[in-house]
Amino acid sequence: MKIYTKSGDKGTTSLFGGARVDKNSKRLSVYGTVDELNSQIGIILSENPPKEIVKKLIRVQGELFILGWDLATPSEKGLELRVKVKRVSKYYVARLEREIDALSTSLPEINNFILPGGGKVGAQLHFARTIARRAERDAVALSKEESINPYAIVYLNRLSDWLFILARYANRQEKIIEAYWKGR
């Protein structure tokens, strides 16, 4: 099987279900950003993160594929009958929340903003958080024009919180002191 199809050479691509859209559409932008986030997590995994979070990161990579598939499949009546799509749900969000709560218990309380950074893993996790926030903004923009799974936005919002906590956790495991923003 060839990797190239040439069907997108004129600036369009197919969504699940067969509809063709321009490659600069908001729908493609959001799931392209989700793909970028997934690649960033791959970079984090190459940096040997704390073993306690490796399985979680790999699981989230799988969830991001589901989210991408979800976002690439319009929510249209009748389409769900033709195309079986797994979509993110409150279950995914609840698991992230449980993990945030569990990891937070081992971290010092914060009263100021934390400057993104730390060790290689912590800094890369902070960067992943910013990609998740961009994906969330893109999903919100798309939702203003087209119907999408509302849990896609909630999942991305919680995922950015989860990545923030993982960055703090990774820095703590490496005994790196977080830098706080001093403000004015």
Image (cartoon, rainbow, N blue to C red):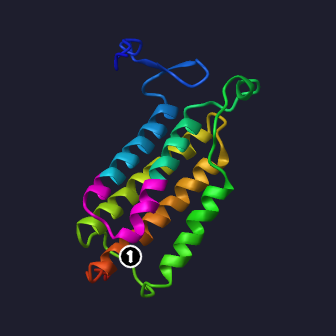
Q: Residue at x 31, y 76 (%)?
A: 171
Front residue of this view, candidates 23 and 172: 172
Residue 154 is a magenta residue: no
Q: Amino acid at mark 1?
A: Tyr
Residue 113 lies, with reference to residue 131, above or below; the image says below
Provide residue 74's location: percent of width, then percent of height. Answer: 63, 30
Q: Which residues are magenta?
A: 43-59
Provide residue 161's location: percent of width, then percent of height. Answer: 49, 66
Front residue of this view, candidates 60 and 109: 60
Residue 110 lies, with reference to residue 28, above or below; the image says below
Provide residue 14's location: percent of width, then percent of height. Answer: 51, 20
- Element at badge 1? helix
Is residue 88 in view from this perspective? yes
Q: Residue at x 26, y 56 (%)?
A: 46
The reply, left or right, for residue 11 in relation to residue 175 is right
Residue at the spot of label 1:
169
Is residue 184 in view from this perspective? no
The reply, left or right, for residue 79 in relation to residue 176 is right
Residue 44 is a magenta residue: yes
Residue 77 lies, with reference to residue 126, above or below; the image says above
Provide residue 20's location: percent of width, then percent of height. Answer: 53, 17
